[in-house]
Amino acid sequence: MTTNGSSHPKPTPLGVAPGSKFEDSVPAFPPDFLFGFATASAQIESSPTEGGRGPSNWDRFCEQPGTIIDGSSVARTTDHYRLFREDIALMKKLGVNSYRFSFSWSRLIPKGGAEDPVSEKGIKFYNDLIDECLASGITPFATLYHWDLPAELDDRYGGWLSKDNIVPDFLNYARLCFSRFGDRVKHWLTFNEPWCVAVLGHGIGAFAPGHKSDTEPWIVGHSVILAHGYAARMYRKDFKPTQQGVIGITLNGDWAEPFSDTPEDIKAAQDKHDVAIGWFADPIYLGRYPQSMIDRLGERLPKFSEEEIKIVHGSSEFYGCNTYTTNLIKAGGDDEYQGCTTLTFVKPDGSGELGQQSHMDWLQDVPWGLRKLLNYLYDRYKTPIYMTENGWAIMNENDLTGEEAVHDASRVQYFQGQLAALRDAVVIDKIPVHSYFAWSMLDNFEWASGLQARFGCVHVDFETMKRTPKDSAFMIPKFFHDNAMLPQ
Ligand code: PNW
């Protein structure tokens, strides 16, 4: 599919990276390049019980006092369940050609398990959503698991802590999605950001289910890798021959730049990549856990059986990349989830911070890291890349009026830098990137940061649920139209 036609506008130099040799504007993106906005069920749907939806671990987590900064909850987010047709109409108007969303497991199978009943009302909601996308010329790009686990599975056996229970339940859920939606959905992500599931959910406890442990994350990560591997194998064996789609996993990972050129800092940056990315990507694309993790974690890191690693190795048909920022990495530190390194945004010469600060402490605007990251990923994993998230929360945007918030100059600036770096990676470095999704379509429920951290390219008034596109919502599709190749 393409959004280009005979009225294709002349390419403009919008988004040429500072210092790029690529001064003129050559069309960069092939006609089948997918671009649009990303969302996740728990963050936008609301309607927590409609159609028989069962509670998720996030419904439970939000009910515990003190977990969500503003006391908000997945129960009341942006009402997308009710307003999805309006949201898709808006995406069509903005001119995107794809939409990345996730299924809510407990909307489809309220209790979650392989023997539990399916909710036909849940199926109908996603059927309607997919059909509405297709009728609007928008390619649906679906994630099976974006963090909302049916609460019942936590109660029964501790969710991801029990691989022998969760893998069959996840496979049953995946089979349901492939069989009911795969005639129309051709782009599948098994998991969104397993590092966050393992570390933020089970290590630090900032996300559901809120466990604090230095052993659970490695067990959870292992279960997720296996569930991904078995689900992808099932898709490729039972569905792909007729449905002809692609399946992969998406990982979070930001560029790690050595703080200095000492061997210690260079090694530290690699150790950081090993935990942030390699923990999942190395087994999946290279067939083993990173040696630095094996050495550091010893018995705490589960081992793959011979059968398991055969399933896992080569299970992802592309690399799904969620990335937001760049960190400088110094040797030394005791945070195992960062490879026992120290992350900083402060420049070595003492001249200040790397980039502008966002609302999130982990996110600064550092565009040059993206091109390096894409080169690193392609060099190491040698697989095509789908960019599935990239985005910006303006510092204290929630304090602005709606009229003020729609002129989101620092978000526009962020995306201009990111998109320019992406184009340089594609055009100059020849990295095969096949999609780009901005996080997020709407201001939404930003997990533990609630409704007060706004990542949306479209403003949401959480009282009236009125949507108003911000300047960035127009700028991102325009970039891809301006830089697209004409269909052959
Ligand atoms: C991603 N970190 O989460 C998720 O996929 C989205 O659901 C989320 O809304 C978005 O990014 C913005 O946060 C992340 O601590 C959560 O580095 C935390 C981190 C990174 C990504």
Image: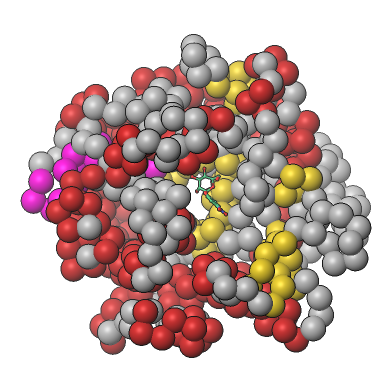
Nearest to the observer: residue 202 or residue 238: 202
Q: Where residue 128 appears, x then y in whole percent?
A: 32, 28
Residue 108 shows in the view: no
Q: Where residue 3 appears, x then y in whole percent?
A: 60, 35
Give the image quarter of residue 104.
Answer: top left
Question: Most extreme residue toward the front, as rendered?
Answer: 65
Give the image quarter of residue 302.
Answer: bottom left
Give the image quarter of residue 201.
Answer: bottom left
Nearest to the observer: residue 148 or residue 251: 148
* Residue occupying the point 68% across, 31% down: 396
* Residue occupying the point 49% across, 11% down: 464
Span colored in magenta: 102-116
Nearest to the observer: residue 75 or residue 417: 75
Q: Where residue 21 appears, x then y in whole percent?
A: 90, 60
Does residue 309 appear to the left or right of 434 in the view shown? left
Q: Is residue 164 above or below residue 93?
A: below
Q: How many marks?
A: 0
The colour scheme is: secondary structure
Dominant SS in magenta: loop
Residue 209 shows in the view: yes
Q: Is residue 256 above or below residue 310?
A: above
* Residue occupying the point 65% across, 48% down: 361
Question: Most extreme residue toward the top, as rendered?
Answer: 464
